[in-house]
Amino acid sequence: MQCPHCGAVLASALGCAQCGRLLDPPAELSPFALLGLSERYALDGADLRQRVLRAGRLVHPDFFTQAPAAERELAERNSARLNRANELLSDDWSRADWLVGARGGPAENEQRAMPPAFLAEVLEWNELLEEARGAPASPGMQERLDSLARTLAAERARLLQAVASLLEPLPERGSPRLAQARTQLNAIRYVDRALSEIEALSLTRASLR
C-alpha cells in the first residue's frame, strides 16, 4: 500500500506515518489489510501489538482536537476501526471465525455440529456443572470444578491446534477444511462458555465462605 498524498509505503491503511495524513480506507477492507498484514491464521502477537500502537499514534482523536470537524470525525472512525480490528485479530477464536467466513465457510449459526468424540466428553462435563449449580459450597466440589477447568483449558489448546492445522495454509473457497474448522470452533465456543460458568460458580462459592 502507498499513501495517495506522498507516495510513502503505508504500514496501515488508516494513516500515513510519513506525511501524517489520515486516510479513509474502503469499508470492506479486511482487518488484516488495515494493519498491513496478509490474511492468515498464524500471527505474531508482538508484531500485531506494535502495528496497533503505531497506527494508534496516527489516528488517535486526541491528536485532532484542533483539526476541522471532518478530520476529527475521520480520526474517530479510524480509531474505532483500529480497535475493532485489534479485538478481532488478537483473539484466536475471532480471527479463525473471520477467516472461515471470509473464505465462504459456514457461519456459527449455519453449522452447529461439534466433533463426535468431543460430544461424549461434553455429557460428562455437563453433569458436573449441573451438580455444581445445586450443590452447597464445599472444598470437595471446588476441587472438582478446578480440575474440570484445567481439563477444559487443555482441551481448548488442543482444539486451537486443530483449527491452526486446518487453516494453515488458508484453504481455498469451498474447501471441506472450512467446515471442519467450524466444527472445532463450535467446540471451543462450548469450552469458553463452560470455563466462564466455572469462574462464576467459583466466585459465588468464594463469596459464601
Image (cartoon, grey):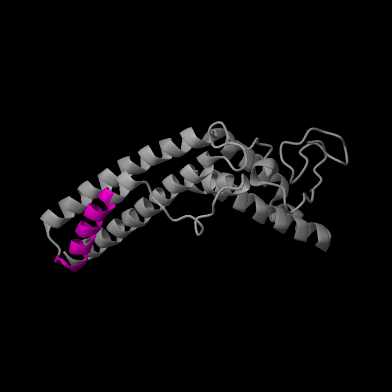
Q: Residue at x 42, y 40 (%)?
A: 160
Q: Quadrant of the C terminus?
A: bottom left
- Is 44 in the magenta? no
The image shows residue 150 at horizontal and vertical percentages of 26, 44
**Image position, residue 59 (x, y; %):** 71, 49
- Residue 127 colored in magenta in the image: yes
Observer-nearest of 67 and 116: 116
Closer to the camera, 190 or 177?
A: 177
Q: Magenta residues, as a range?
A: 120-136
Q: Is residue 153 left or right of residue 69?
A: left
Q: Residue at x 46, y 39 (%)?
A: 163
- Give whichever of 31, 173 is nearer the camera: 173
**Above or below — where is 64 with respect to 49?**
below
- Vertical placement of residue 205 versus 186, above or below: below
Q: Quadrant of residue 6?
A: top right
The front one of 173 and 46 is 173
Left or right, residue 137 beside residue 184: left
| Residue 66 makes an appearance in the image | no
Q: Is 44 placed left or right of 162 in the picture?
A: right
Q: Residue at x 77, y 51 (%)?
A: 26
